[in-house]
Structure formats: C-alpha cells, structure tokens
Image: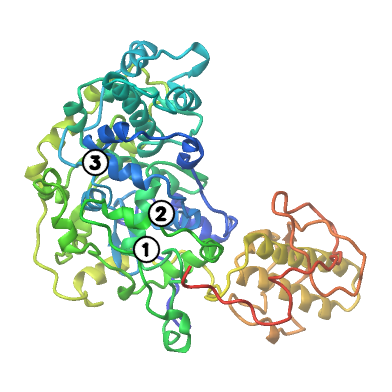
C-alpha cells in the first residue's frame, strides 16, 4: 500500500456524525493499547457443563423455533474477530463499513443461520408485579430470597434445579424443564447482557403462555435488535465488553467475509498471492443437511492455536486491506435455503423490511437498503436514516415499573405494518465497478482505515500478545534509560540516535501510546512511521526532553549480562514500572529460538 492515500476519513462527515466518539479514533491516534480486545460475555459453555438436555425437553425447544440456536450456542467466541468488527460497526447506519462498501447482519442472515422465526409478534412485555410468583408459576418451583438480586435470578439456581430431568417425569414436568432451559437460552445467550451470574427475570413472562403463543414470537428480529444494540455500545471509545448473541455475529462473518475463518490465515495483499503457498484453496466445513440450521456447519471446526494467535492486529490489517473477492455478499446455497421449513420461507419478503427491531427496551433500525448486494440486488446510494441517539440511550436501569409494550407502541405498530416497508431493486450484475456512483459516494462518507500503521503483521506467524508486549516493554525501558542519560550530556548525538530508533519502533509496531511528546518542543524525528530504523541520521535535532516516556517494562535482572535475548513478561501481571534499563535473564522458548525458521501455520487444522 506504499504511496496510497492513508487519510482515514470520512471526507464528508454528514453520515458518520458520531465519529468523534467512535473507538476507531483512539486506535488511529494510538491512545489505547492496540492489541486490547473486548471482553466477550458468552457464558454458555461454563454454565452448561453437566446440564443434560433430555430429548423430550429438546422437542419443545425445537417446536418454538430455537433448536438451531441451541445447537450453535456452545461454540467458543473469537474475541479478536469480534473486536475488529466492532471497530468497523457504525451506530449511525447499523452496518459495518468495509473498504468495499457497507455490510451487516440482516433478518435474512438470522433466519438462515439460526432458523429463528422472523414472522411473528414483537418480543416485548409489561412491568413485573410479582417476579418471584411468576417464576413459581412458570417453572413450578419458587426461588428463595437469596436467589433474587434486583431484577435478576441467580443462574446457578436455574442450573442446579433443572439440570437433570428425573426418570419417569410426566409431560407437565417435562414442560417445566423445557421452560427452564428456554429461560436460560433466551436470557443468558440470545438476549444475554454482561452479567453471567444472573438471568433477567423480565424474560420469564414470555414463557407464561401456551406453546403456540411462545412459537408466535419473532425471536429472530429480537435477536438482531439485541446484537445491534450490543455492537453500537461496543463501538464507542472506552467500551471494554460486549454481550448478546455473539455466535450469530461470528458465524455471519465466517460466511460473508473471508477473514477469520477457523483453520487458515485468510489475509492476502496485492502481489503476494503467487509468492506464497499459504494461499491454497480453503476447504470450508461441509454444508449442513437440509434439516439443520445453516450455522450448524460451523459448530464442528475448532479455533486452533494458530487461528487464535493471529490476534486483533491481524484482523484489523486484514479488514483494512479487504478486497471485493474476499467478500461473498450472498453465501448461502439456494437449494439449502429452499429446504427451510415453510413457516420461515413463506414470509421471506419480511427479510427486506425497513422497520424497527424490538426487544423490550431495545429498538434498533433494520436498514436493508444499505446492503442490497446481500439480497442479490444492485446497490444504489441509500436514503438517509436516523437511528436515534435518544433510543440508544434507553436501558432498563431504574425502570422496573415501565411497560415497554406501552412505551414503544409506535414502533410496535410499524413492526406490525412491516409488509408496507419492503425494499426492492434491480438484480445485481457482477461485481460493482469501483467508479460506480455508490462507491464514489461511499468513499467520501466512510471511515476507510482503522490501522494507523503501514507495516502489516506477519502472515505466517503472529506471536502471542505477551511476547509482543515483552519486546515493546523492553524498548520502552531502553528509551526511558537513554532519555535519562542524556541529562549528563556525553555522546549526545549517538544516544539521541538510539533513543529515536526506539521511539520510531514503538510507533511502527503500534505501541506509540506508551511514549508521549513533552509540551513546548519542536524537534522533528528522523524516523517517520513505517520507515526503517537503519537510516537514522545521528545529527537528529531531537532533544531528550522532547519525550515523556511512560515506562511500563517488566522488572528484570542484571544477571548474565551477555544475554542478547529478552524474556517475555508473565501473562497475568506483565508490567511493573522501572526507572532505568536492565538486561533480562535468558530464557529459551521454543517459539523464540534461532535454531531454524518459525513453524508455518497448519492450514488443515
């Protein structure tokens, strides 16, 4: 990408009006740790250990339309991939802004991937008058006072009480156990928040009906509303965690974007594809059977060590360099889509409805006109939209007596009228021309780049974060020590040269947030971002006081002063403050020895 315009954008700020508070600003300005990932609140595996789902219970889960989601829910989450996607999510448009255009998770994606019903009543309800009594009525067992905290029911109580269906249970008991598991699946995973210890009692009322009524909810639209809300919150600067149906987001990304799929490094750059055998054809997991949800095909492949080791810098760089051939706008096999149950296919026109999505207090806009290529239609410049900052500020805190069915009645009316808001267009003919009016407009209003560095991460081997941080911390300590030594004045030009090399390295590899210019100095570094440190001018005018180095290097030892190899910090508490440079003790590691080339990633894993 040498010589390419690296202005991140947007040039025209009329669309991305919240850019000033978006997390991409902090990444570009290098004011945050570039490898820090969002904490993904996905507790399914932990809470389901030892919880056997009896086939009779599962039959009710299948009946209400959550069978596909049940099978998908136990997959681990790739935190780095989710974080990289959150950096490109825009609350203003409810879409990911990629180099090739906007894309998003749509009602169509949710219906195909999970087989959650989209057609149906919006998921909402009223204030809970007697939540403990409601639990007793729905689940047949009333929790004790210690099991209730505010509006939450202790997850452990649900698990301990309904973990195993007793032998010889009658149908009434089977139904209670089925409702208990559905309550966990809905409150803990499908609409899960950031708490893993308690399930939200507000969702119990959805199960206080007969099974046909429960089946009549639009679980798919509520799932998507929750995902949108979680992405919107995570996209803001300072956000540290994300919840909701993250497994849907992950499976959607693996289907649509050829970056981050398990088992292979999926990034490529211009001119490199023919030079490296790592770009051999990728064998995706087998397609699902006609009676399975499409996303079930991703349940079997595991996230290998090589896959997880790529980390956030890898994904950030891959998405910055994404090309048209790395995106599949409509990845679903038509024959498998046509094999979906009739109660889903008969209402597929609703998948293109431009309507509000509702889940109790959450109201989010579904905007398919911004991603028409995902429906096989030609993309044109979309109409303006207002996703409402005010609506995004609404939550349930302090609103236990609010009836959300009454609070959002206008949006509920729009949902019921969704067939009046179906978007259409002309069929898509081949790939979009880069000079298409849409792309010319899009390049002006989008945020083009997230990664501020010119230097891409290695496509062969991406070290673990603690090793990368160890190298960066040693460099920080060196810069700090040299800055202090400059106060004595000897060999100033030579010491300045080494000090500037250290600062340039910190910038080039994304750790510039550890070094800050001191105010009141105008020196110019001889090492620009991305330039090799081998060309340093020893007469650089940089002064020692120009930098205020925040040293966070690990404390080391002065034993074995001949050591030329630095020890990475421990993973739990990697850094402690030091005031001068100290050599590190040698500690041989399999992944840092110089006995031979680094092992190549096993692409078949």
Return the residue found at the far front: 168
Give the alpha-carbon distance from disc 3 to disc 1, as whole Å.
31 Å
Q: Which mark is residue 216?
A: none
Judge from the rendering whether residue 267 lies leftward or rightward of residue 387; answer left or right: right
Residue named by callout 1: 10
The crowding category of the residue bearing disc 3, from other C-alpha atoms within 10 Å (few below 14, some 14 to 19, many at least 20), is many
Q: Is any atom of residue 272 visible in this view? A: yes
In the image, residue 305 above or below residue 71: below
In the image, residue 114 above or below residue 485: above
The crowding category of the residue bearing disc 1, from other C-alpha atoms within 10 Å (few below 14, some 14 to 19, many at least 20), is some
Which of the two residues, 464 or 85, is positioned nearer the viewer here? 464
Q: Quadrant of the N terminus?
A: bottom left
Q: Position of residue 277 (x, y in %)?
A: 46, 84
Residue named by callout 3: 221
Q: Is any atom of residue 394 visible in this view? A: no
Q: Position of residue 386 (x, y in %)?
A: 25, 46
Residue named by callout 2: 19
- The residue located at (37%, 78%) in the rendering is 281
Which is in the foreground here, disc 3 or disc 2?
3
**Sequence-wise first label, 3 or 2:** 2
Q: Position of residue 439 (x, y in %)?
A: 25, 70
- The residue located at (30%, 74%) in the rendering is 324
């Amino acid at each position: 990408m040498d010589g390419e315009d690296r202005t991140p954008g947007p040039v025209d700020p009329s669309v991305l009006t919240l850019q000033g508070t978006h997390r991409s600003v902090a990444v570009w300005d290098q004011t945050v740790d570039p490898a820090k990932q969002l904490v993904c609140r996905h507790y399914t595996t932990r809470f389901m250990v030892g919880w056997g789902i009896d086939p009779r219970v599962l039959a009710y889960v299948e009946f209400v339309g959550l069978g596909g989601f049940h099978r998908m829910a136990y997959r681990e989450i790739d935190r780095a991939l989710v974080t990289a996607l959150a950096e490109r999510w825009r609350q203003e448009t409810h879409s990911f802004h990629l180099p090739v255009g906007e894309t998003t998770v749509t009602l169509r994606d949710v219906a195909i991937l999970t087989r959650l019903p989209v057609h149906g009543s919006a998921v909402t309800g009223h204030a809970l008058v007697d939540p403990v009594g409601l639990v007793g009525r729905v689940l047949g067992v009333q929790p004790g006072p210690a099991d209730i905290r505010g509006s939450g029911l202790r997850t452990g109580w649900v698990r301990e009480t309904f973990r195993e269906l007793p032998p010889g249970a009658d149908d009434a008991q089977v139904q209670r156990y089925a409702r208990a598991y559905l309550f966990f699946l809905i409150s803990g995973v499908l609409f899960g928040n950031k708490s893993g210890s308690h399930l939200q009692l507000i969702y119990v009322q959805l199960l206080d009906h007969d099974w046909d009524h429960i089946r009549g909810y639009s679980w798919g639209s509520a799932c998507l509303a929750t995902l949108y809300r979680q992405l919107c919150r995570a996209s803001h600067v300072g956000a540290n965690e994300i919840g909701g149906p993250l497994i849907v987001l992950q499976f959607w990304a693996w289907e649509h974007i050829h970056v981050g799929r398990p088992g292979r490094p999926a990034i490529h750059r211009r001119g490199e594809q023919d030079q490296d055998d790592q770009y051999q054809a990728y064998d995706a997991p087998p397609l699902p059977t006609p009676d399975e949800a499409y996303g079930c095909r991703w349940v079997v492949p595991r996230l290998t060590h090589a896959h997880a080791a790529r980390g956030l810098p890898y994904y950030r760089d891959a998405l910055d360099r994404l090309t048209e051939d790395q995106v599949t706008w409509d990845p679903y096999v038509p024959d498998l889509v046509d094999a979906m149950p009739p109660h889903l296919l008969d209402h597929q026109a609703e998948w293109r409805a431009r309507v509000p999505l509702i889940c109790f207090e959450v109201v989010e806009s579904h905007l398919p006109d911004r991603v028409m290529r995902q429906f096989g239609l030609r993309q044109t410049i979309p109409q303006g939209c207002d996703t409402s900052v005010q609506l995004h500020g609404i939550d349930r805190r302090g609103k236990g007596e609010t009836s959300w069915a009454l609070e959002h009645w206008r949006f509920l009316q729009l949902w019921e009228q969704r067939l009046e808001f179906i978007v259409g267009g002309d069929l898509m003919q081949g790939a979009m021309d880069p000079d298409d009016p849409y792309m010319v407009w899009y390049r002006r209003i989008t945020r083009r780049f997230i990664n501020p560095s010119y230097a891409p991460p290695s496509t062969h081997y991406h070290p673990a974060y603690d090793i990368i941080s160890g190298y960066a911390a040693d460099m920080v300590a060196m810069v700090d020590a040299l800055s202090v030594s400059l106060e004595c004045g000897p060999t100033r030009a030579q010491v300045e040269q080494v000090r500037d090399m250290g600062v340039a390295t910190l910038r080039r590899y994304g750790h510039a947030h550890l070094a800050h210019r001191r105010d009141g100095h105008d020196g110019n570094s001889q090492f620009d971002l991305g330039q090799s440190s081998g060309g340093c001018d020893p007469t650089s005018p940089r002064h020692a006081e120009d930098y205020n180095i925040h040293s966070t290097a690990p404390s080391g030892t002065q034993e074995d002063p001949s050591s030329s190899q630095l020890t990475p910090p421990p993973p739990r508490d990697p850094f402690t403050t030091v005031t001068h440079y100290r050599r590190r003790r040698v500690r041989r590691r399999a992944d840092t020895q110089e006995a031979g080339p680094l092992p190549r990633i096993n692409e078949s894993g």
